[in-house]
Amino acid sequence: MKKLAILGSGFGSNFEAIARYLKDVEIICISDKPDAYILKRAEYLNIPALVLTLDEMEKYFSENKFDLVALAGFMRIIPENILSKMGRCINLHPSILPAFKGKDAIKQAYLYGVKVTGITIHEVTPVLDSGRIIAQYPVIINDSMHYDELEETIHRVEHIIYPQVIEKLLNGEAVEFGVSFGNCGGKCEGKCKECGGGCEG
């Protein structure tokens, strides 16, 4: 069975989307914040969870090996001495990198007035949002689109694309651009049968 570690510091909606999508994968949730809501999501989904400081992670990943480490809202830059112990580590960023790196990327794109933004999944390096790009998916910003609508659309795309990319990486498959949204257009956030989940939506 493949082993996946998911690191997060906050709300954990992408963590839940990944956990619900993947089948027959051993998942552990790791947070650097003891009050992060991602830990409550892990408890609800019966997924083991740990709270580790950045310093504690070096020892943990030296002693515990994973097929993949995925960041899902992990709000720290991971130094090379820890990354070297993790193996392959990927991150999701809510823009089309290299544009709009760092915090508040969705707001950065919206305020700048670009007509296309999206998401990027990339390898993690000690340099912020600069690792090799694995996959990208665009989101069009219509003239009438409010910021809240853009944010909701970006998150919906994240919840569908990120789990599919993780699954392909775990299975050693090529990551292609044409990932599936099913007939629902992604409104199910990856939960309906056509998008890989279990509901009838």
Image (cartoon, helix red, strand yellow):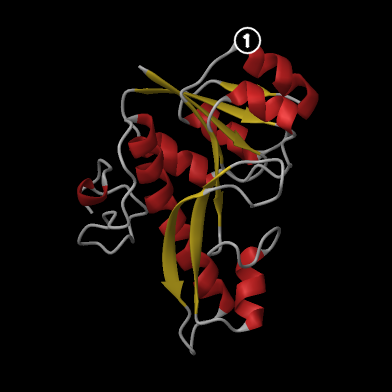
What residue is shown at x 35% (from left), y 33% (from top)? Answer: 22
| Residue receiving disc 1 | 63
Q: Quadrant of the C terminus?
A: bottom left
Of helix, strand and loop, which one carries label 1? Answer: helix
What residue is shown at x 29% (from left), y 54% (from top)? Answer: 179
145 vs 3: above or below:
below
Q: Is residue 18 left or right of residue 201?
A: right
Q: Nearer the viewer, residue 133 or 8?
A: 133
Q: Residues within 10 Å of mark 1 (few under 14, many from 20)?
A: few
- Could you say which quadrant of the image residue 147 lies in? bottom right
Q: Is residue 10 left or right of residue 145?
A: right
146 vs 198: above or below:
below
Q: Residue furthest right?
A: 55
Q: Quadrant of the N terminus?
A: top left
What x and y, as percent, mark residue 14? 50, 46
What x and y, as percent, mark residue 94? 56, 60
174 vs 96: above or below:
above
- Could you say which quadrant of the image residue 24 lies in? top left
What residue is shown at x 59% (from left), y 37% (from top)? Answer: 38
